[in-house]
Amino acid sequence: MPFNPFIHGTSSQTLSMMQHTDFQLMPIVAMLNNFKVAPMVGELTQGGFSIIGHGSNLDTITGAPAFGRIEHTHYDLDKVVGNYAKNPNDTNLQVCQEYFKNFLKSTHKSAFSDLNLLMIYLVRLRQFGVNITDVVSADEINTLRERLHATVQFYYFLMCVQKHIYIHGAAIDEFKKENDLQGDYAAGDYIEHFFSFEAFLEKLKKTQFNMEEIYNSPSFENINKLLDFIKIPKGYQEKIKRNPCGEDNFAAKRDYHFFSSQKPESGEVFYEEIGGYLFTNHPSYSFAYYLERYYQSYMRAQSKAEVLLNVFPDFENFHSKVLSHIEALQNRITLCKALLDARDEEFIRYDEQDELIAKPFPVVFVTEAKTIEEFENEYRSRVPLKLGKEMQLLATDNKENQKRLRDYLQKNHVGPAEVLLFDDLYALRSKPEHYFDALGNDVWGMAFELAKKQNCMNGFCKLYRTFAELNEKRYRFKTTNKEVYGKLNELFIALQQTILTPDKNKIDFKGIQNTLQRHRQENYILYATHRGILGYIDTLLTILASLVIFYPITYVVQKSMNIAHTFFATDTEKKINNSILAVDEILDETAVLG
């Protein structure tokens, strides 16, 4: 099969963030929940977060990492590299403050459908060490809390519509006639005034009316309470805005009920699906809009218009969507309140000196993870993907940034993971036969775990990095020198058998050393014409010498004394580092000969 992995484009700022998420690329809501860390880059304001999404905070596809593929109709390598692996968003404090204030205003209007976005900027501010009440007033935060609770009650009201209470078209028409309302939009203007999301929320907030109780216990008494709550009471006076302009001075002559406890009789009618956009409170999808649509259909039916025009909004079948939305919204509200109330020390502070943030560069993660699922025109993973496990290949734009990526992996003891260039991904796409022989396999994965137990991660990560660089060398020879490529293949196949001891309980540093020495001796004449290869092998042998000689002695002595051991004494570490640096200089000088 052709090599067509999933690819995710981002910048090095994501790598900085991943240092605080156990090196996982993961859904944003779960990241806020588990680590109190917010993303610094990504497509945040272009539609993906305009909905709450389904599922719990730990299991939602909304805000999950998005992937394309090297070959793909919509999100191929060109688009991922060109549009997503680029310079990051501006993350300075002032920008975050403005975004938070703007989203705090807009999220009320959108029925909190973009609450995820508000939480992202809330956490960003807290990672800057900012007290939220220094950005907006305490009253605004209290209003947010109250309206979030009221929003849940509003959706329980929607669950009651056409289930426990029914839209009363005749009563709405009687209201219109009795108050001598003129114009095509007359009923709609009053419906919008009394039953808009904003008006409903204010009434719920002031009265603390418990819609959830009504929905769960629809007794005769409770239904009457609900009808009394939503009536237009006698004596109510207010100015009503009229479309397209002007206003009415309205005074209710009596109690008006737009809903009834009795299900009305209806002839043959057709139903129109109510989409999820109702949850965004968009003017063309709001509850008030659908209530007006219902009234208009009722009036057409009464006028004996063509039966095909009698299309009513399907509130009943919409209830299942509402219930799942309530569950997801309650999860997000719980998280939002937790983020507002958390102590300052629970948040990871931004390190503005981190060069991954200060001097960002493009990165593409490459994976063949089985947990990735199709989502519209792209792919997403609701399961966290860990660097060094599910993601074992990265790419960037040039050699300098390739080195920075390798430095990052080595410093953080992450692996197995290798680093190629974007040009290599393009080559892999155009010539699938030039498949990259990655080191990432079960044996290397086990070796990383064993290195932690053997307390030799520093030395082992140096060893792995050099093997990874030699492996890239092998890949370059795949198209330029079949003989050298074949010999390096033999080396890596032999190493595969000797990395671990036969019982697989330890890394066999001595076995690796013997394999390298034997291979060096057998192929010295060939490799002498490619001095870069000898340089890598000599670097590997230098590192292995330290692991074989110093590690066992230190380990055995300290273990016998039952004390916690570190890997190297300080002076030994320095000597080894100096030796490796010396070999690195030779490699740099002879790279052109490789």
Image: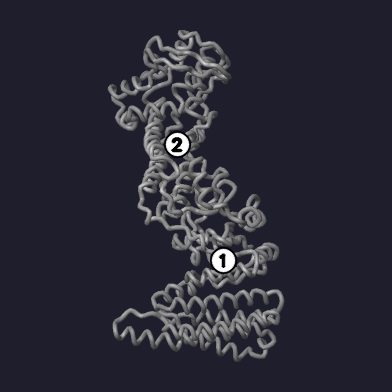
Which amino acid lies under the numbered mark 1 shown in the image of this protein? Leu
Residue farthest toward the front in the current orientation of the protein: 134
The answer to which image quadrant residue 395 occupies is bottom right
Q: Which of 490 and 128 is in front in this view?
A: 128
Vertical relation: 101 (above or below) 388: above
Callout 2: few (<14), some (14-19), or many (20+) C-alpha neighbours within 10 Å?
Answer: some
Residue at coordinates 47% horizontally, 79% vertically from top-left?
A: 459
Q: Which of 344 and 463 is in front in this view?
A: 344
Residue at coordinates 49% horizontally, 66% vertically from top-left?
A: 389
Where residue 474 is drawn, which disc sits there?
none
Q: Give the percent coordinates (x, y) of residue 200.
A: 41, 27
Vertical relation: 205 (above or below) 557: above
In three-dimensional space, the C-alpha distance between marks 1 and 2, rounded to whole angstroms, equals 39 Å
Where residue 321 is drawn, which disc sits there?
2
- CB atoms of marks 1 and 2 within 8 Å: no
Check disc 1 and report its element: helix, strand or loop: strand
Q: Nearer the viewer, residue 430 or 459?
A: 459
Confirm whether residue 511 shows in the render. yes
Q: Give the percent coordinates (x, y) of residue 513.
A: 51, 87
Which amino acid lies under the numbered mark 2 shown in the image of this protein? Lys
**In this rendering, would 108 be left or right of 165?**
right
Vertical relation: 119 (above or below) 576: above
Q: Name the residue under label 1.
A: 393
